[in-house]
Amino acid sequence: MRAGRWLADHVVMGAAMLVLLYMFLPIFFVVLMSFNDPTSRLSYEFDGFTMANWTDPCGPSGMCGSVVTSLQIGFLATVGATLLGTLVAFALVRHRFRGRAATSLLIFLPMATPEVVMGSSLLALFTSAGLSGSLGFWSILVAHIMFCLSFVVVTVKARLAGLDQSLEQAAMDLYANEWQAFWRITFPLVFPGIMAAALLSFSLSFDDFIVTNFNHGNTITFPMFVWGSAQRGIPPQVNVIGTVMFMIALLLVLGSGVVRRRRPAAA
């Protein structure tokens, strides 16, 4: 019996480790290639170790400019989508109005729509509105807010639906007004969901290629730069940017885990 239990535990552990290896193998390869010293631009093999890619990450012309553009669009799209999506989520969960069920259903459509369809539709919309000559930063931003909005609504709505409204009622029984009950009870409980939605929005916006490709005009984002570079050899500094983004995401995940562990202890 003990042998069977031991075998089952280790088989599950082994399967989990293989799945994790499958998930993270490309990331390990990106980290490794960030130290690569290629013999030519078209070489994708590890030809030698160097720190030059890290000491001069902006070496390739236009790369850091594209990263800054992606960061700007990602930040603004995150703020816009999180603000609008949170308001929509509160309206759908806390208020009853005509068309509420249809709105909840329609919110999912942008998530289910193929990106190539959304990108071409937005291009047709901008062109019909006479904005084909103005495609660029702002058209990309409008598109990114549009497809991030659904993910924010779904994430925040799920968090709100799981809240016990009796907590707010208890606060109001203790003479808190509606604003105090919201700010001191509801918002702290919903905040993890809002943060998760914001991080998801930034990630979706930063690495979007398909929708951006239809509406970028002369603006080059980081995914567009990588795609353009692939035709003449991707510079190894691209792997440096990928490694930095992975490390930032890892720190955010670890930080949120630390905060979650400290909260019960503080309570």
Image (spheres, helix red, strand yellow):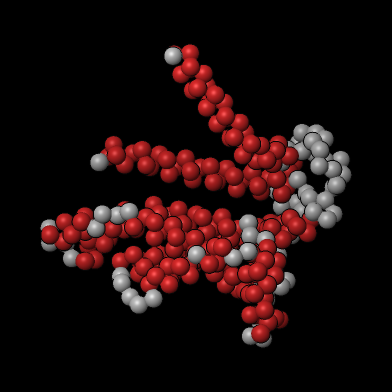
Please state which of residues 243 and 187 is positioned toward the viewer in this rendering: 187
Q: How many marks?
A: 0
Pick whichever, 244 or 84, lies toward us.
Answer: 84
Residue depicted at 77% across the width and 33% down the height: 49
Residue 117 is situated, as x and y percent measured from the top left of the image, at 65, 69
Tell me if residue 53 can be seen.
yes
Query: Residue 92: image x %, image y %?
Result: 36, 68
Q: Is residue 66 visible?
A: no
Rendered-image quadrant of the C terminus: top left
Relative to 255, residue 65 above or below: below
Q: Is residue 156 above or below residue 129?
A: above
For residue 196, above or below residue 149: above
Name the residue furthest left. 174
The one of 49 and 154 positioned closer to us in this rendering: 154
Identify the residue at horizontal 42%, vertical 40% (top origin). Answer: 257
| 193 with respect to 208 (left or right) | left
Quick one: quadrant of the N terminus? top left
Which residue is found at the position 69% from the left and 58% from the top? 223
Q: Quadrant of residue 133?
A: bottom right
Can you say whether 39 is above or below 224 in the image? above
Classify residue 172 as left or right of residue 95. Answer: left
Q: Residue at x 75, y 57 (%)?
A: 227
Give coordinates of residue 59: x percent, y percent: 75, 51
Residue 146 at what x, y percent from top left? 54, 69
Image position of 185 (left or right of 161): left
